[in-house]
């Protein structure tokens, strides 16, 4: 990470990838055989990234369990929605931090509403909290009544 933006030389063999800067080897990794796989030495990561590397999906689920079952469901759905769960960590962390700005009870209610509407994303949950929708009762989706008047034709019209 200290060499971002600098010119390096990369040498790779069937088994090893080496990185050189100013003719000095600065990194050597075994080559991953997995398609799209990677091998990263935590010592080569910035300190804040190393802390993130210690996070696991299970850790986020445990944090969510302290808030409630709807929050757990949202976190699990977000984690399951990514090929690599690490890609969802920022969203999960953002959602869990919302409890510090409001309350765990409000976050739990917001997660329940988000699940009911099928919008389990950080931005949606943040909007629910900001708009105070977490305090509103959740009407079933099929309870939405379509108004009747001359301009509404209905499904039979299109048969």
Image (spheres, grey):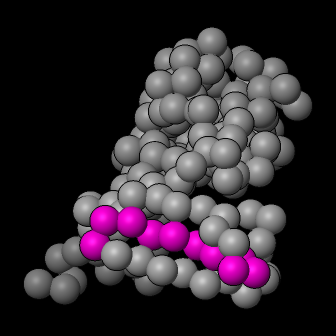
In the image, is residue 49 part of the stretch drawn in magenta? no
Q: Residue at x 54, y 81 (%)?
A: 10
Residue at far left of view: 159
Q: Residue furthest right?
A: 101
Decide: is 67 above or below 79.
above
At horizontal 75% and vertical 81% (from top left) the residue drawn is 22
The one of 147 and 125 positioned closer to us in this rendering: 125
**Which image quarter: residue 48?**
top right
Q: Which region shows up in magenta?
A: 14-23
Q: Is residue 126 visible?
A: no
Q: Position of residue 145 (x, y in %)?
A: 45, 53
- Residue at figure coordinates x 31%, y 65% from the top left: 15
Q: Please tell me which residue lies in front, 159 or 56.
A: 56
Left or right, 77 with reference to 9: left
Percent x, y of residue 87:
53, 54
Image coords of residue 131 (percent x, y): 81, 46
Q: What residue sits 77% from the left and 51% below the top?
A: 46
Q: Is residue 8 above or below residue 38?
A: below
Q: Say which of 58 and 136 sits in front.
A: 58
From the top left corner, tell me how far across and down residue 114 is, in percent.
Answer: 55, 42
Q: Main secondary structure of the magenta part?
A: strand
């Amino acid at each position: 990470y200290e060499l971002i933006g600098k010119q390096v030389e990369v040498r790779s063999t069937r088994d090893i990838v080496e990185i050189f800067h100013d003719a000095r080897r600065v990194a050597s990794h075994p080559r991953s055989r997995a398609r799209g796989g990677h091998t990263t030495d935590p010592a080569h990561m910035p300190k804040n990234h190393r802390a993130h590397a210690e996070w696991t999906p299970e850790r986020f689920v445990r944090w969510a369990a302290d808030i409630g079952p709807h929050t757990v469901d949202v976190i699990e759905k977000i984690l399951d929605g990514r090929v690599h769960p690490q890609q969802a960590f920022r969203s999960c962390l953002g959602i869990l931090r919302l409890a510090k700005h409001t309350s765990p009870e409000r976050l739990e209610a917001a997660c329940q509403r988000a699940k009911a509407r099928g919008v389990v994303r950080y931005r949606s949950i943040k909007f629910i909290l900001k708009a105070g929708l977490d305090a509103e009762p959740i009407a079933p989706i099929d309870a939405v009544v379509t108004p009747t008047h001359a301009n509404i034709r209905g499904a039979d019209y299109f048969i």
